[in-house]
Image (spheres, rainbow, N blue to C red):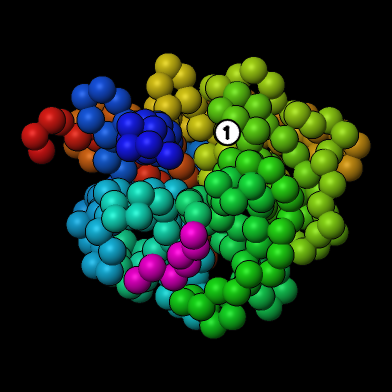
Amino acid sequence: MTAPARHALLATCLAALCAAAGCTSTGPQIWSIGIYAGSAPTDLAPHPDAKNPVLTAGDVTDVPAQFVADPFMVCDNGTWHMFFEVMNTRTRQGDIGLATSDDGLRWRYRRIVLDEPFHLSYPCVFRCADAIYMVPETHQAGAVRLYRAERFPERWSFVGVLLTGGWLDPTVFAHDGRWWMFASGGDATLYLFCAERPEGPWRMHPRSPVVTGDAHRARPGGRVVTHDGRLLRWAQDDLPTYGRGVRAFEIVRLTTEDYEEREVTDVTTPGATGRGWNAEGMHHVDAQRLSDGRWIACVDGCRQQRPGR
């Protein structure tokens, strides 16, 4: 390959990575992580005792980081563990980082816990029986891959491939004795899959794709949760620009043969605030129910990096 051809290929690859990270002509979007809270997963606001953002690229100590995003939490033995994408500026790909907290408000960055030869993001972490699993987005590897905590929270082992293809933001959850997975075929298309156990085999739902041609609601935006008997999913609103906010949808019918959802209108939806760390957008919510019935959530948000800064 000639030098000009190599330069052209590198420019194309960097442009693709930049687009995935939300870059614009004025500079990249810098994503950070904050803590919200409320009486319900659909009624969230910045936690009054959290100094948002609670995690930024500046907190990452073991790799050079451009941003942190896509947080998922799990509480284990009284300690909160947060897993999230770290955009590594040296390798130009995402790794999965870990932070911990005793109260869910003040977080300490620990280390990168999962690093592969391909891009990783959206580390969907969940429990099944006595095991803790992670399904990160691994579309660059052409597969959806399952990992299991060999020594939680820092050591993860690869279990197997759940699906082949370049699926975006796979979101795994349990409901009605089965396991389900949403995954996007692009910003405007959402597919649904079903299995008897996390390891599979997974089959595509007969109603898939369950969303087509709608970038306002297709791409997953966080964990599926149950509240007051309602099964709720978060979706990224990617119009008019990527990651402007999230929208909530109630799954009103979910069987092995049928699927139906409707938008939740009585919702305080996290989105761009117009100032500060989340001025330009938000595209992820992981809401967790506390023992007192209230909810805490880790969210991400972005601001525009201005030229020269």
Q: Is residue 238 left or right of residue 106?
A: right
Q: How many labels does the image show?
A: 1
Q: Residues within 10 Å of mark 1 (few under 14, many from 20)?
A: many
Q: Nearer the viewer, residue 211 or 37?
A: 211
Q: Does the magenta stretch include residue 114?
A: yes
Q: Quadrant of residue 253?
A: top right
- Amino acid, disc 1: Arg
| Residue 163: image location, x then y, percent | 74, 50
> Over which residues does the magenta segment extend?
111-117
Q: Which of 94 and 209 is in front in this view?
A: 94
Q: Tell me if I can see residue 299 in this picture.
A: yes
At x 27%, y 34%, the residue is 28
The quadrant in which residue 22 appears is: top left
Taking the view exactly as shown, the residue that stands out farthest to the left is 308
Residue 294 located left or right of residue 146: left
Quarter of the figure with the N terminus: top left
Q: Residue at x 38, y 36 (%)?
A: 2
Q: Quadrant of the C terminus?
A: top left
Q: Is residue 197 left or right of residue 117?
A: right
**Location of residue 9 with respect to 237 vertically, above or below:** below
Residue 168 drawn at (x, y percent): 59, 41
Toward which corner of the image does residue 279 lie, by quadrant?
top left
- x%, y% of residue 24? 30, 25
**Residue 58: where, in percent of width, then height?**
20, 57
- Taking the view exactly as shown, the residue that stands out farthest to the front is 2
**Residue at the (65%, 27%) spot, across then down:** 189
Q: In this view, does 288 lie above or below 7?
A: below
Task: Report which residue position mark 1 lands on.
Answer: 219
